[in-house]
Amino acid sequence: MRLDNFDLRLLRIFMVIVESGGFSAAQARLGMSQSAISCKMNDLETRLGMRLCQRGRSGFRLTQEGEQVYEETLSLLREVGDYEGRLGQIRDKIFGHVRIGLVDTVAMNPACRLSAAIAAFNRQYPEVGVTLDVMDSNEIEALLLQGKLNIGLTSSEHEMPGLSYRTLFCERQRLYAAADHPLFSLAERPSRKKDLMPYAIAGRGKPGVTPVDAAEGFTVRASSAHMEGTAVLLLSGELIGYLPEHYARPWVEAGRLRCLDMPALDYFPPFMLTLPRYGMRSQATERLVEEIERAHPQGASVPVKAGTPEPA
């Protein structure tokens, strides 16, 4: 079939529905009612001559054809964005689309100047679209390698082949306990790592990420790769675990969390500008990378600090 602008608009709506997980969740992103979204999907299915998804009380699910159309549309829209970028280069005008993936809670970190970088970029290149999605570092790295993201902000323990990394800033992660946890109300706070061993911890989803879950003798009862998930686990009152100091502060001030204040167990993960090492970048991506680096002038010299030695 021949595609026109109407078909592309319908396909973009379809992509948002899939990425949102259904019609209801897509309403806010599309600014459309559920009935209007349903009509658009019916139009697209009629145009394509195939059923793309199952919807109803059982929930939203792509058909086999729908999964294939999603993958093909992803490729098509990526090519359209790259094509727009190439045309812009020919006309010495930058436009197109830049896709960014970043880890959670960085917006609350005063050392993160990504918002300032995007603001400066938008002022200079108002015709470039920017999409920003939050996910864990492993997902970001995978999508960068697949060409589905242009820029990543990651906090990985290990560097992936095929990607380049540049440290932009760090954050301080500290141990916390919630108001319902036994350690919260202790008059004398624990001072040694072994004092914490009787208490279950919230891990990061893989071993060896924090100073505590890397040590022997600790029990990881639950885990999350995201800070939001870790906060929920800690606020349950059953576990102790690490949160970024800036992220935990509102709960500390509200009396819902208490920092265990063990500086020797603090750690300082780096946050890195992560890019595909190979392949040509669009001018839009290059300019945004420049703005991000300009907004973090001390990034290259930021030390990755570790806790100081402590008594066993």
Image (tube, grey):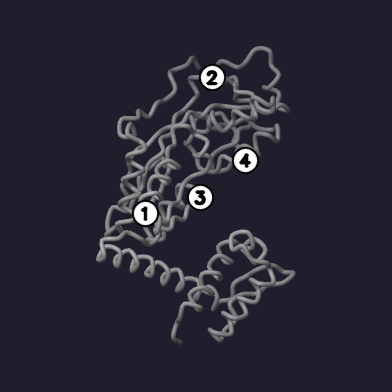
Q: Residue at x 50, y 75 (%)?
A: 69
Q: Is residue 309 above or below residue 44?
A: above
N-terminal-most mark, 4 or 3: 3
Mark earlier in primary sequence (2, 1): 1
- Mark 2 vs mark 1, foreground winner is 1
Find residue 71 and report its horizontal and vertical position in percent. Answer: 47, 71
Q: CA distance from mark 1 to mark 4?
A: 45 Å
Amino acid on which disc 4 is placed: Ala
Q: Amino acid at mark 3?
A: Met
Closer to viewer: mark 1 or mark 4: 1
Asked if residue 86 is positioned above or below residue 105 in the image, the reply reads below
Q: Is residue 107 left or right of residue 85?
A: right
Look at mark 4 in the image and give the residue it sits on.
222
For label 2, the SS is loop
Return the residue at label 2. Answer: 262
- Residue 135 at x, y percent in the picture: 51, 50
Label 4 vs label 3: CA separation? Answer: 19 Å
First of labels 1, 3 by sequence position: 1
Structural distance between the alpha carbons of marks 3 and 2: 29 Å
How packed mark 1 is, by other alpha carbons closer than 10 Å (few <14, some 14-19, many 20 or more), is some
Q: Earlier in the sequence, mark 4 or mark 2?
A: 4
Residue situated in front as seen by the camera: 93 or 204: 93
Q: What residue type is disc 1 on?
A: Tyr
Q: Which residue bears the numbered disc 3? A: 135
Q: Secondary structure at mark 4?
A: strand
